[in-house]
Amino acid sequence: MRIYLPATAADLAADPITARRAHAATDSLAAALPDEDEEGLEVSASLCAADASVLLLSEPGASGLADRRVVIAADVDASVVRELEVGDEVLPGTVELLAPVAWDDVAALLVDEPEARADVAAARTGDEEAFERAAQADLLWFDVSERRALAAELG
């Protein structure tokens, strides 16, 4: 099962990647977006994870982290994922990862373009307009073999 984990630059140095909430192309996401095909559902799940990355950057202790959203796309066994019930604070397609993820299971890294930094910086302080602009920014695709270089670049 492909999952999209919201992350920060600090997660690129973690080994393994800690269990957390993630997003996936689940039945509940398909029901919420009935006109989307599998690829569209995957894109939607990755964008939800990118939005959640901003929330991680807003947490206490994250002030020194790079102002760029990071999403880790990983393939995990469905037995280590539990879909959460949709509610006020839980979007369709939200899953709970029940075990850490090894870097060998990572398919790709998705990271904001450097030009998105100003909007991400403002979004992480609660600026809703900046959050919307950041949500429109493209994420760049990186192979997992590039994670150490990317971690160094992001600081």
Image (cartoon, helix red, strand yellow):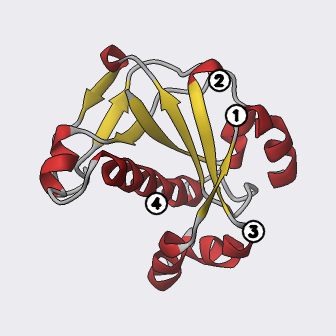
Q: Amino acid at mark 3?
A: Pro
Coordinates of residue 78 in the picture (x, y in percent):
32, 19
The secondary element bearing badge 4 is classed as helix
Residue 34, given in percent of the width and then of the height, sits at 14, 56
**Between marks 1 and 3, how big is the CA–CA gap?**
19 Å
Relative image position of residue 140 (x, y in whole percent): 65, 57
The residues bearing labels 2 and 1 have C-alpha atoms spaced at a distance of: 8 Å
Badge 4 is on which residue?
Answer: 51
* Circle nearer the N terminus (1, 3): 3
Residue 36 picture quarter: bottom left
24 on left or right of 150: left
- Pointer 2 with pointer 1, Cβ within 8 A: yes
Q: Earlier in the sequence, mark 4 or mark 2?
A: 4
Q: Tell me the mark number nearer the camera, choosing from 2 and 1.
A: 1
Asked whether the residues under the numbered discs 4 and 2 touch, taking CB atoms below 8 Å apart as contact, a structural biologist would say: no
Label annotation for residue 103: 2
In the image, what residue type sits under mark 4? Answer: Asp
Reading the image, the residue beneath label 3 is 114
Q: Earlier in the sequence, mark 4 or mark 1?
A: 4
